[in-house]
Image: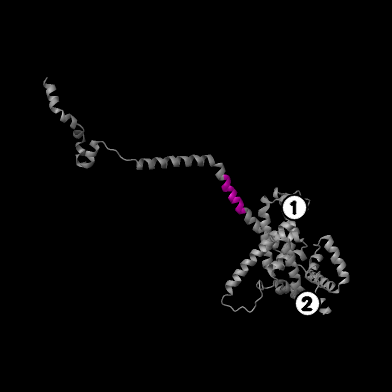
Amino acid sequence: MPLKSTDPDVQLMLRFKNGDEDGFRKLFSKYQTRIINFCFRFCSDRVLAEDLAQEVFLRVYRAANRYRPKARFSTWIYRIAVNVCLNESRKLKKRYVTQSIDQSMSDDQNNRLPEYRDENQVSADDKMASRQRDKQIKKALQNLPEQQRMAVLLRIYNEFSYNEIASQMSVSEGKVKTLIFRGRQTLKQALQGLI
Amino acid sequence: MDKKMKKSCNVTDLISPFIDGELSPKDNASVLQHLESCAICRKEYDALKSVDKLLCDIKPLEPSFDFAREFWKKVDTLEAKKSRWSILKNLSWGWRPALGAVAALLVIASGSVIYYRSAPTTLDPTGMLIAENITLYSDYEIINSLELLENWEEIITLEEI
């Protein structure tokens, strides 16, 4: 059931639904960096992250006519981002498995995405900023199973409640609690030297 | 023995949701109180807080200079597709009565054709005779007047009277 929301972003989306494109432009400029970073932290590939972020905004754009505010706008847009990232991850995994049929797999991490080329490492600007520590943190994050990684990202970077994360990931709150707990434990082990 | 026991604590599992503010007020208060007295849990709490901090310390990416431009290009493509569709849609709505009439005419016409093609052809005996002896067709007038020939004698008699 649609709620009467005081969330200013919901109001912008409703304005867009009623034909005011400026509402969407404001949302786009407000969320573009956040969504790119969410996708980047998930897939660790800048080019792919921007493609995924564009897909997220296109879905928002297309969904305007059907939009019914049931939660905060941010909860809704991140739900779309979660779906887009997980879909892409499934596609990549499938391709990765197909390509790897004749290759010996030395890496036996369960549920682990292939290590994509980190565009930051080749970008001149980012080379300066990239430090060993950051690499280690990114790697630790990439080594988390994707559901744990997703839950950790939504909680730690975007500060969503367990209830919101459950809705975004279509799982129970209890599962979210477990995913975040396990994710933190794994990260703690992986980043032992930095803590 | 005592040292071994102190490696874990019942409250440890609650530290992650405690950090996230996801415990009930009662549990929250008890974890808070516990942390003051339990060194193991305090250590765990500090470690998990450090993990969060390390993750948040990574500098976020800025969108590339053409990110927005590329996105709006995609939107333009989407809009162009949409408008092509809407033209088709409007066209079909505007022409709906005419299209309906044409469709009805087509149905009637095709129905008629089917009916006439499938209807059995019934020929009168004369027609049958022509069909069997098509060469007689040129003498159709004579054949059609055979009845007169059959009554020829009577006609002559009548003429004689």
Q: What is the x, y in percent for residue B69?
A: 69, 60
* Residue drawn 73% across the image and 61% down it: A173
**Is residue B58 or residue B84 the one in the foreground?**
B58
Residue B129, located in which quarter of the rendered image?
top left
Residue B61, located in which quarter of the rendered image?
bottom right
Q: Is residue B82 magenta?
A: yes
How crowded pointer 2 is (Cα within 10 Å; few <14, some 14-19, many 20+) is rated as few
Residue A59, located in which quarter of the rendered image?
bottom right
Furthest residue to the top?
Answer: B161
Q: What is the x, y in percent for residue B148?
A: 17, 29
How crowded pointer 1 is (Cα within 10 Å; few <14, some 14-19, many 20+) is rated as many
Chain to which the residue tagged by mark 2 belongs: A
Q: Amino acid at mark 1?
A: Val
Residue ID for mark 2: A192
**Is residue A92 or residue A177 the one in the foreground?**
A177
Q: What is the x, y in percent for residue B94?
A: 56, 42
Q: Amino acid at mark 2?
A: Gln
For the record, the magenta segment spans: B80-90
The residues tagged by marks 1 and 2 sit, at their Cα atoms, a distance apart of 41 Å
Chain to which the residue tagged by mark 1 belongs: A
The N terminus of chain B is located in which quarter? Answer: bottom right
The C terminus of chain B is located in which quarter? Answer: top left
A94 displayed left or right of A72: left
Q: Is residue B95 above or below residue A8?
A: above
A180 displayed left or right of B110: right
**Is residue B108 or residue B75 the one in the foreground?**
B108
Q: Main secondary structure of the magenta part?
A: helix
Q: Are marks 1 and 2 in contact (CB under 8 Å)?
A: no
Q: Is residue A87 magenta?
A: no
Residue ID for mark 1: A10
Mark nearer the N terminus (1 vs 2): 1
